[in-house]
Image: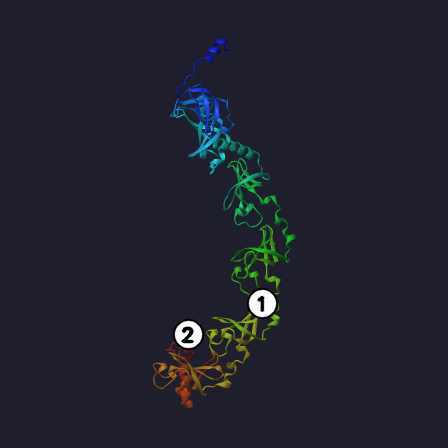
Amino acid sequence: MLTMEEALKQSTAPIRFAANEIVKGTVIEVRNKEVLVDIGYKSEGVVPGNEFDDIKTVKIGDVVDVLIEKLEDKEGMVILSKEKAEFQQNWDKILTICNEGGRISGRVKSIVKGGLVVNIGVEAFLPASQIDVITPKNLAQFVGNTYDFKVVKINQERQNIVLSRRELIEAERSERRQKLLADMVPGDIRKGTVKNLTDFGAFIDLNGIDGLLHITDMSWGRIGHPSEVLKVGQDIDVVVLDVNKDKERVSLGLKQKMENPWASIEGKFPVGTKVKGKIVNLVPYGAFVELEPGVEGLIHVTELSWTKRIAKPGDVLTAGQEIEAIVLGINRDEQKISLGIRQLETNPWDSAESKYAPGAHVKGKIRNLTSYGAFIELEEGLDGMIHVSDISWTRKINHPSEVFKKGDEVEAQVLEVDKANQRIALGIKQLSTDPWSNIDQFYKVGDLVSGQVTKLASFGAFVGLQHEIDGLVHISQISEERVEKIKNVLKAGQEVTARVIKIDRSDRRIGLSIKAANYSTEQLKAEQAVLDSLKPGEDLVALQHAFDAADEAVKE
């Protein structure tokens, strides 16, 4: 304990007024940006207002420790610093407390380049990367707040200290993470915050560990992207699905908090019932229809119409469209429902066999022409096809456009109804008798006939006869003299007279001879014998090969 004499000596000890000395002063005036302090010197001292935590709380008469920076400036004032006095007083104490790795509390003072200035008794630097686990973009939110920090570096020569708040947070999170992993079991419901969204899911902060909420576990229904359900910063309750303690991974679920709508699906949507829904997705093979949240059915493209061949669902349906459909099948294990739209209407093919019995005569407009036939619309959505081979008994039709055009009204006979493959075969030639069945009544070998040249080929000419039958005059049968080019002798449309020299019933062909028009009976027999004796391949002289070559020429 001090004696009275020692106390008097201390109280009367002279004050040392010199730069870098720490002295006590009394506040004598508080201005907007500075405080006047009397330190017992011949002139007052000035302390900047920003060195006080709040200049508004400073009162006249307050005693403060200050460091003399300069005894007199140009105006004769003493320049003082409250912060530097505290720094000098606290530095040794802080060195003792704040060994590197130590923990200390401090108040964020201001923002500087690369981070923050923190007052821990002395000014210390907090890098932006060490403020939080994720570097914040807005540093102003931390100014004025008090936090705990870890001392990561001390430089005594420069008298500066580097702090980290992030390491304390990570250490605390690690402790919480280990505790969470130890306590957490599948089935738990935990509170969390959406930390980040990706294409495949969302990372949820469980206050110590991040868990993955996969997009397939967000809803029983269809989700295109997690942002349709969640947003960053949102607080949610999630179900723990799996915990991997070795890899510190947690799988989470959101839809598991709700009842699985597929558990009682058969009772909700029995097969054969009519349902309503909204089209949520169109794909090349069908349309997906949402029947209720989490339950979708597929309308396959083949189930859109009984009669129309629809290439893709987008031709008749649009996304978002409300429609009705019939439940065709349910697979609860695979969570699939098959739907159909065409089942809402009567299948016209159910009555096609009785309505269009073979042999019946029908009428209709030509709707389409293809290389192999013509399609006739018998009724809305129901077509019949006339194959090119069923257009004429006698004429060689290579394309139906030679006879028909779209929109023509035609009459035909039903040949066959194939309900399974949804096909009706029609024929036009069947409306009349096949002239070749009675060819002997029309033509005999030796008959003299007249007709018009219809086609020219390198090997001969086709002549149109009665009953829509064509005869072929081979180039060798035009003249007694050798004919080099058929076009030098005959022209399309020219009327000619010829003799029937051959009738081939099996191949439905008639051979004619212009040069034999004036032959006697004996000459005709000789000419026919010559034709019959020819073998295939002899310069297309044989009638059969002449016709074959004609067919190929027409195709080309």
In the drawing, does residue 175 fall left or right of residue 525?
A: right
What element does badge 1 sit on? loop
* Neighbourhood count class around disc 1 (C-alpha, 10 Å): few under 14, some 14–19, many 20 upward: some
Q: Tell me: residue 48, above or below residue 528.
A: above
Q: Mark 1 or mark 2, which is nearer the start of the sequence?
A: 1
Quadrant of res 481: bottom left
Q: Which mark is residue 453?
A: none
Q: Which residue is mark 1?
A: 419
Q: Which residue is mark 2?
A: 552
Q: Give the residue type at disc 1.
A: Lys
Q: Tell me: residue 444, above or below residue 45.
A: below
On the image, the x and y values in percent for residue 6 come to 47, 10
On the image, the x and y values in percent for residue 427 come to 53, 75
On the image, the x and y values in percent for residue 111 come to 45, 33
Residue at the extreme right: 267
Of 265 and 443, nearer the camera is 265
Could one spot residue 125 in this view of the protein? yes
Quadrant of res 255: top right
Of 320 and 49, nearer the camera is 49
**Cα–Cα span, label 2 and label 1:** 36 Å
Q: Give the residue type at disc 2.
A: Glu
